[in-house]
Image (tube, grey):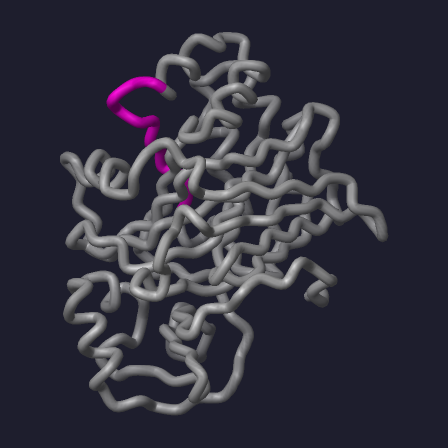
Amino acid sequence: MFTLSAHKIQPEARMKIGTISTQSNPYSLTFEDESGRFQLSQFPTLAEFLATSLSELRESINSAERIAIGTQAWGAPIAAGTEIWGAGVTYLRSRDARIDESSTPDVYAKVYDAERPELFLKGTASRTVGTLGSIGIRFDAASSIPEPELALVINSHGECVGLTICNDVTARSIEGENPLYLSQAKIYRGSTALGPYITPIWEIEDHSKIQIDARIERGKENIWEASTSFGQLRRTFDELIGFLFRCQDFPEGVILSTGTGIIPPDHVHLQQGDVVTMSATHLGTLENRVQLMK
């Protein structure tokens, strides 16, 4: 474990929903507000939470008996059976970067303007870490980068119930070699970080005003930092969710990472020991150290 370094302070949410590891469940669901940390008996894990409609969730949180618990470090806000999906080429900056990187650039230009978005399976709970966990870079990739993204936490009814930060770690050199290698570039141990918690959607007045700040630290040096606003996202939440739920069922909900508007330049790539920090308005700070995966 390591300590959070200094970062740009972002407003925090009034309510936070996350997971902690207990003896009985590694994905035990926890709530936090100004009164402290608590649990609700009807939502022992995120799976039960994401099987419930948005209106029922709000009513239960407001009316159910609270069981106070002590402070414990957040885990990745995901249930054991929840899938993580990604949306690609949803920002103009991402389209341009993918065109520059790819040996077949026309496919990225076409999907940016197409009616159907690019959607792909990104990860599972076993491949995902929370804040202060170690993200991975592949030993067989010449270049890997972090991709700071806004992630939608969606229940089984297709309703967005909250937002969180996703670090969609990508083996840039592998994806650039051939788009058909996307799964190898995106899905492996430590390829996804989520957190630090879920901010309920009813606490977000306007997601387009959410700003995310990202940086890579190597030792005591910042080797890259950038910011973007999610107002630049080309696709709407409803549009992305609608396509994701076509011919698909998600009984334990699904997390959809919406694409990145921040791409490190070609000369920047992750190395073992780097620390990646992402802070977003109302969504907290996600920080992870890089580990080489073999």
Quadrant containing the N terminus is bottom right
Residue 157 drawn above or below residue 92:
below
Rendering coords of residue 200 (x, y %): 34, 65
Rendering coords of residue 169 (x, y %): 55, 40
Residue 10 seen in this snapshot: yes
Rendering coords of residue 154 (x, y %): 27, 53
Q: Residue at x 46, y 17 (%)?
A: 179
Q: Using residue 2 as the reference point, say whether residue 80 is left or right of it.
A: left
Corner quadrant of residue 87: top left
Q: Residue at x 24, y 62 (%)?
A: 50
Q: Residue at x 61, y 44 (%)?
A: 136
Quadrant containing the C terminus is top right
Q: Using residue 156 as the reference point, say whether residue 191 is left or right of it.
A: right
Residue 123 drawn above or below residue 155:
above
Magenta stretch containing residue 115, yes or no? Answer: yes
Residue 189 seen in this snapshot: no
Rendering coords of residue 143 (x, y %): 67, 28
Corner quadrant of residue 46: bottom left
The span picked out in magenta is 113-123
Between 261 and 220, the one lying in front of the other is 261
Q: Residue at x 49, y 29 (%)?
A: 184
